[in-house]
């Protein structure tokens, strides 16, 4: 396929579940234009909105989809994966000691050297300076205090936090599908 007049790499499609909710908010459920076109031809999605851009091959042309919905409902995960990204998302990309959002890493509240485990209940987001300051000590030994205690988040809590961090690019055709359950202004 040959893209005409505009780099189509800048044309991802928002992917909605069969109930018209995004598969995820953060990271936002987006597919490349190639994956989207493939899903269209395989009959896996409905096209809900399109870009003004076309792709062409010798035998056909198609406007690039900007919003698609899956034809088959995908059951959302009941429990979020325990990943570094999801820990950062739970903690809103802020150090749980000082609130800074730069140079983030994660810290064991109870250090592994003291029997602490790598679990939702013992890992928090920390900036490198605070992490170094705490070292292998317990909180009471380090003089640091937690802004919030670690916990196992729900998928809904992570999605809600993700809405606070919109991606750098939002196409106007996505707005009706991203924030339909937000409270309306009077």
Image (tube, rainbow, N blue to C red):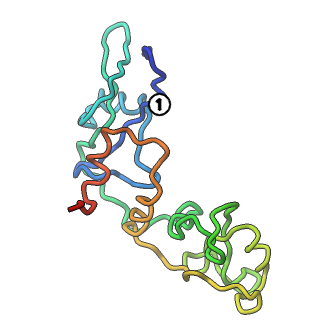
Q: Nearer the viewer, residue 133 or 65?
A: 133
| Percent position of residue 140, x then y | 72, 92
Q: Is residue 4 above or below residue 87?
A: above
For the C terminus, the quadrant is bottom left
Residue displayed at 45% across by 55% down: 26
Residue displayed at 33% across by 34% down: 66
Q: Farthest bottom residue?
A: 140
| Percent position of residue 99, x then y | 62, 72
Lateral position of residue 163 relative to residue 146, left or right: left
Q: Is residue 19 above or below residue 5?
A: below
Q: Please tell me how crowded label 1 is: few (under 14), some (14-19), or many (20+) other residues with Cα within 10 Å.
A: few
Residue displayed at 39% across by 66% down: 155
Lateral position of residue 113 relative to residue 77, left or right: right
Q: Quadrant of residue 64?
A: top left
| Percent position of residue 115, x then y | 70, 86
Lateral position of residue 48 relative to residue 142, left or right: left
Residue displayed at 25% across by 59% down: 181
Q: Quadrant of residue 179?
A: bottom left
| Percent position of residue 60, x then y | 30, 12
Q: Is residue 71 above or below residue 159?
A: above
Number of numbered discs present?
Answer: 1
Residue hosting label 1: 10
Q: Is residue 55 above or below residue 128?
A: above
Lateral position of residue 133 relative to residue 162, left or right: right
């Amino acid at each position: 396929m040959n893209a005409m007049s505009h780099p189509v790499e800048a044309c991802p499609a928002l992917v909605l579940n069969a109930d018209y909710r995004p598969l995820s908010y953060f990271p936002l459920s987006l597919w490349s234009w190639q994956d989207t076109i493939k899903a269209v031809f395989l009959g896996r999605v409905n096209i809900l909105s399109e870009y003004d851009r076309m792709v062409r091959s010798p035998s056909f042309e198609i406007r690039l989809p900007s919003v698609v919905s899956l034809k088959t409902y995908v059951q959302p995960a009941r429990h979020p994966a325990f990943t570094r990204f999801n820990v950062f998302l739970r903690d809103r990309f802020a150090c749980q000691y000082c609130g800074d959002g730069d140079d983030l890493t994660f810290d064991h509240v109870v250090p592994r050297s003291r029997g602490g485990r790598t679990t939702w209940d013992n890992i928090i987001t920390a900036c490198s300076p605070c992490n170094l300051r705490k070292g292998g000590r317990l909180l009471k030994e380090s003089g640091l205090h937690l802004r919030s205690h670690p916990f196992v988040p729900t998928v809904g809590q992570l999605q809600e936090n993700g809405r606070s961090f919109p991606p750098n690019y939002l196409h106007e055709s996505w707005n009706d599908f991203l924030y339909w359950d937000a409270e309306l202004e009077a």
